[in-house]
Image (tube, rainbow, N blue to C red):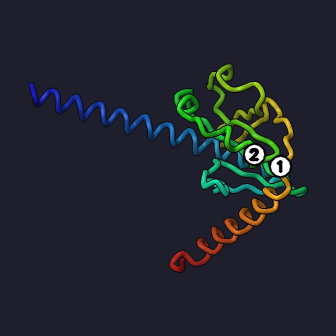
Amino acid sequence: MEHITNNLTLDLADADTDRVSRAAGIAKGISRGTGRLLRDLGYEVLEEFKLASRRRVDLAGLDRKGRFAVVEIKSSLADFRADTKWPEYLAHCDFFYFAVADDFPLEALPDAEGLIIADAYDAAIQRPAAERPMNGNRRRSQLLRFARQSAQRLAQVRDPARR
């Protein structure tokens, strides 16, 4: 009986690994398509942008006017339900969006936030985000943070051995 239990445990672990891997692939595709959309809209985009609060947003876009868009990617309903930190991002952007795949149950998302439907190749704004102008001091600090993180990433690509 122990052998059967061990195999079952391994099968469940494999199923969990597969589920996590699929979710990561979905999130990666949503990120790619949403990044393309933001760039088409005139934003420069950073993935995994670290805020002053030490939180990391999935995508941060900076437009020519110095306005920030933050996008929180949700690969599944379980991912959305488990996330309690996204409201903390609102103070760090002028526009906030959720980005999801086309099969996501949209009624679960807050109506007050922007919504992007995306896949690995394209994205479309389903619901525009309301503009919430950022605090001026936070904007200045975040602009510098965005510039520094961009430069650090470029330096890492150009000279990966040096850190």
Coordinates of residue 40 in the picture (x, y in percent): 82, 49
Q: How many marks?
A: 2
Extreme residue in the right direction: 65
The residue sitting at 79% across, 35% down in the picture is: 125
Q: Is 13 or 22 nearer to us in this picture? A: 13
Residue 9 falls left or right of residue 130: left
For label 2, the SS is helix
* Mark 1 → mark 2, Cα distance in angstroms: 6 Å
Coordinates of residue 129 in the picture (x, y in percent): 81, 36
For label 1, the SS is loop
Query: Badge 1: few (under 14), some or many (20 or more) residues near its Cα, within 10 Å?
Result: some
| Disc number placed over residue 115 in the picture, else none | none
Q: Quadrant of the N terminus?
A: top left
Residue 127 falls left or right of residue 151: right
Q: Quadrant of the C terminus?
A: bottom right
The residue sitting at 64% across, 71% down in the picture is: 152
Mark 1, residue position: 134
Residue 60 falls left or right of residue 20: right
As drawn, 62 above or below 20? below
Q: Amino acid at mark 2?
A: Ala
Extreme residue in the top direction: 107
The residue sitting at 64% across, 32% down in the picture is: 101
Coordinates of residue 51 in the picture (x, y in percent): 66, 55
Mark 2, residue position: 91
Q: Are marks 1 and 2 in contact (CB under 8 Å)?
A: yes
Coordinates of residue 128 in the picture (x, y in percent): 83, 34
The residue sitting at 62% across, 25% down in the picture is: 103
